[in-house]
Image (cartoon, grey):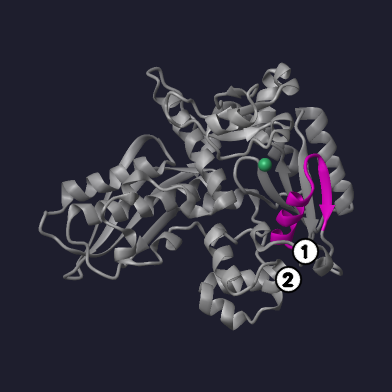
Amino acid sequence: MERTVLHIDCNNFFASVECIYNPKLKNVPMAVAGSTEARHGIILAKNELAKKFSVSTGEAIWEAKRKCPSLITVTPNFARYYKYSRLFKSICFEYSDRLESFGIDECWLDVTFNRKSPIEIAEAIRQRVKSELGLTVSIGISFNKIFAKLASDMKKPDAITVIPKDNFKEKIFPLPISDMIGAGKSTVKKLSDHYILTIGDVATANPEKLKRWLGKSGEYLWLYANGLDKSPVRRYDEISVVKSVSNGVTPYRDLVNDDDVKTLIYSLSEGVAMRLRIKDLICRTVSLHIRTSALEHFSFQCKFSGIVADGGEIAETAFRLYKENCKTDITLRSLSVCAADIVPYSECVQLDFCGAAEKSLRRESINRAVDNVRKKFGYGIVKRGILMQDVQLSDFNPKLTANTLPGSFR
Ligand SMILES: [Mg+2]
């Protein structure tokens, strides 16, 4: 039986939620942006009026204000976004329990077994989210997740786009590769070196060659472009089955000092944290697994009272575990960082009285912003300062930065 998958994406989510709380913002060019004082002044989301001035996500506030001097900026209120995320997804959930979140404001919905037609369902969701919540959505309808996502990006805001099985080639083959999920900046660059520029070029390319140039992701890209993505839409509650998220590597050379270990831990932790955030999960335990050059295994772990889905915090903990437990003259063959004791974010936002929750929400919003920028421009576009130091990751393994990519971006 042919599958029917919807991808539903809230338009300008952060900005739209802020406009619900302060309707005056609807009539002026407005953007949600990190605070200037904290030096995280980048644009996280903007409304349609700001878009007209070409204000774009990921740019610095000063750049945006140069294009649009009257731009009003609002600092993010993450608790509000989570509230609306839940409300939005609970409307979608009424049409199928096969609902897979993709970040805070997007989800896939498998409606194959719903009696109503996909267009009817999409239309109902579009109208209900608008009238009940005051948000607009873009919905893509297709026969797999990749094309549904692609379709939802084709027309915005407040629109429904279908990519049907019988003529998907006409619709998507002329589009640039970068439009497809899984094609980051470096992939696009590598392919353009071989004059492969459009999704159609990928689809008709030799899959063996793609694999040689891009590794495993070349294979996937070819399958995706040909409409052969078979990955299921997970049930909404399958998420809690995830017990741990880990990221490890055996580098080309042994890790001989603290700087080596630290660099690697930070790189791996970023990937772990991002994967947690994509699935709206947090962890309460961080563990570090090492193998020495004498091939002995050791594991250390640390439990938190608070909540963690932050690469910096995970890395700090893992590095502390290393410092506390390992002698200085030890050399390591491999290491992995693991986040365990995992729970859905929505279940456990704990507030306290000394500002720690507020601080962590602020960090969360920065992390989400970075995720969004990476989703658009590729994983490598944002790097931690520590990863730009003398110890280069490519010393260990040239593919390392790619290895830390969450699966859905590979
Ligand atoms: Mg969105």
The label number, if any, that marks residue 172 in the structure image: 1
* The C terminus lies in quadrant: bottom right
Residue type at mark 1 is Ile
| Rendered residue at 53%/54% (across/down) | 378
> In the rendered image of this protein, does residue 258 appear above or below residue 132?
below
Mark 2 lies on a secondary structure that is helix
Is there any visible trace of residue 279 in the rendered image? no
* Boundaries of the magenta span: 144-162
* Left-right relation of 66 to 242: right
Instruction: Residue 145 in the image: state x and y as whole percent.
Output: 70, 59
| Rendered residue at 64%/72% (across/down) | 196
> In the rendered image of this protein, does residue 74 appear above or below residue 280?
above
| Rendered residue at 53%/49% (across/down) | 374
Instruction: Residue 168 in the image: state x and y as whole percent.
Output: 81, 66
Separation of marks 2 and 1 at Cα, in angstroms: 7 Å
Quadrant observed for ligand 1 in the rendered image: top right
